[in-house]
Image: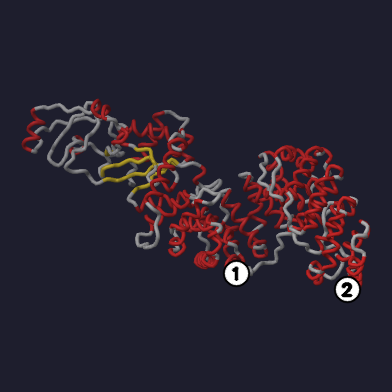
Amino acid sequence: EKEQTETHDSKEDPRVFQKGRPEYRSLCYDRFEPIETLPLEEGDSILRSVAECEGSLSPATVTDYFRKLSRLPAEQHTGLVSRPGFHTLCLCAVQSIGSFSTSELTDILKACVRLAVLPAHPLLNACENEFCRRAWDMKLDQLLLVADCWRCLERSVPSYLSILFSYANMHWRDLTLPQFVQLLYIVGEGRRSPADLMQKVESVILKYLDSFTLEELGAVCLGLFKSLSDISDHVMRKIADRVALQMEDMSTYALVNVLKMLRCARMDHLPLLKELSKVIPARIPTTNIQGIMHISLTCSSLHYFDEGILAAVAAALPPKVIYCRSKDAAKFLWSFGCLDYEPPNEEEFYSSLIEQMHRKLHEFRKFPEHLLTGLLGLAFVKRFPEELIDYALRNEFVQKTRGSKYELQKDLFTLGKSVEIECPDYQGNRLSPQLYQEMTEMVLNFAEQEIYVRPEIVEAASLLKSMLGGPEYVKNHMILPHARSSDLEVHLATDGRPIPFNVEDLSADKRLKDIGVSLTDDLMTQLIKGSCNSQSAMEVPNVARVPGQQMGKEAQTPCTGDAGLRVEPKSGRCLEAPPLVPREVKLAIQVSNRNHYCYCSKRLLGLHRMKRRQLWQLGYVVVELPFWEWFPLLKRTRSEKLSYLHYKVFNPAL
């Protein structure tokens, strides 16, 4: 399949920084270096000479022949490499491989780059072995140039790179600025992060930080990003400080590379983000689709909502959507869903991306994570394309997710349960009950260790139990385990009284100890006749009232059921009479934190917006203890916290 591509060269774009200083000429291969074209007749003459003098060619002659042949017109290269004379020349080089000087061997390698020799060619095998053998006798400039040639040939050379990195690690204090940037470029392209060397990288970055060109700064970030290298907040903030001041002068490509690293470092650098809001929207229309994707993904990863950026992305995307890989389409959907943003052209935006997801369906067999990423982003904004969901929930696809390097079971769980709640008419594939059970247990085990024990949740749960009358009135759990956050569940009667429902948290012993019934004459009469003759009021101190509610006749006997049964608990707690349970208001109290919201705002993220929507659909009233109110209260007095919780639970607006 021939993919449509934009004007974007994934091999050359990362090398733009090399044009910024003359020193790079000795460190890297320049495919744009002007050369004098060799006439075809002279090329034929060389190949005849090779055939006639086979076995008697000197290393210098072999090298000269490679140099000259590489100057043939580009359209002749493919035919040349398959000719017998060229094969004989390569054989001569292999047989004399140890006799070449390092400079000659490097020239042969550069000729192979220009001729586009295949990565697995026997000559390249011999060159790699020889360069590894003599690497420690070479200079760093030579080592970097050879590494760059291997990159241009797209040949994987892990042994050679290990030697290069060890050499650089020993001489890291002597690295010049161009050597350091070229080294990080090689580190990134090799997708390797040598631990001992990377420990010293930060010191060199700080040493040259003010001297890097902006393109070099982008190259440094790209190398760190591609090699999955960690970087300290201090160094990342220093880089971001400089970029924030000079962003207008920076190319979009270099800027996107800085954003990639900013995203990986989880760096909330507000001056840079604010400057991004000013600079990047106007550039979006001329940016390639992958660059736009990384801009969107940076915003969503950092939970940074800026309508100007997102609207510009949404406007530019539909005409370019055909260039999206499966990964790009998925990340766009995730980014907009994560930030819960539906742009002005939402129908065109979402329909174009969903159509592209259909076109790329074959790619999801290899990259199942991308399909789930896109479908979750759509679910956040209440969009459920049934054909794609049916594909994602079929057993064959579920099995593919198990073989992925990513943990995709949680995503399947979230998607499957969301479809159950929000798409009652959906008739397609569903996940198995066994998988639901397995995922529920896994999520709840994690919650018990990491979520339920958070101080802000523990404090709220404890105070609610005290305020409402005991653990049977509050349940700290996940009402929707697939939504990945906890709830404090409380049930209220329509008259505002709390209803005990959490029997799981009460042991049999505690119930026997806390609940007592006095068999009085009045009680016996009620049991026999089914009527209440006593007009005496009973005080229940632990049951909270709705603010402003008057203690009338019904409120004075809160434990009276349909038949007039009145029970007097020892502890003062209220027992509901079994014959009739009053209509309930089920509260799902959310103890939110900053990670539930967009950065520096009160805009809820898509996952949590979806959760609240689903709670509402299941009949819950969502009550929030927002972090900007509850967290400061944690340092205040118990009575202040109780007063706040009382207001939240018994708000007359409910």
Q: Nearer the viewer, residue 6 or 54?
A: 54
Q: Residue at point 45% right, 51% down? A: 609
Q: Nearer the viewer, residue 185 or 256?
A: 185
User: Which quarter of the rendering shows the N terminus?
Assistant: bottom right
Q: What residue did someone put label 2 on?
A: 40
Q: Nearer the viewer, residue 389 or 344?
A: 389
Of the residues shown, which amino acid type is indicated by label 2? Answer: Leu
Badge 1: how crowded within 10 Å, few (<14), some, or many (20+)? few
**In this rendering, position of residue 636 left or right of residue 510:** right
Instruction: Say above or below: 182 vs 79.
Output: above
Question: Element at badge 2?
Answer: helix
Of the residues shown, which amino acid type is indicated by label 1? Answer: Pro
The residues tagged by marks 1 and 2 sit, at their Cα atoms, a distance apart of 45 Å
Mark 1 vs mark 2, foreground winner is: 2
Residue 340 visible in the current orientation? no
Q: Residue at point 84% right, 71% down? A: 73
Q: Pinpoint residue 505: horizontal percent, then vertical percent.
A: 32, 33
Give the color scheme: rainbow, by chain, secondary structure or one colour. secondary structure
Q: What residue did someone put label 1 on?
A: 319
Q: Nearer the viewer, residue 503 or 242?
A: 503
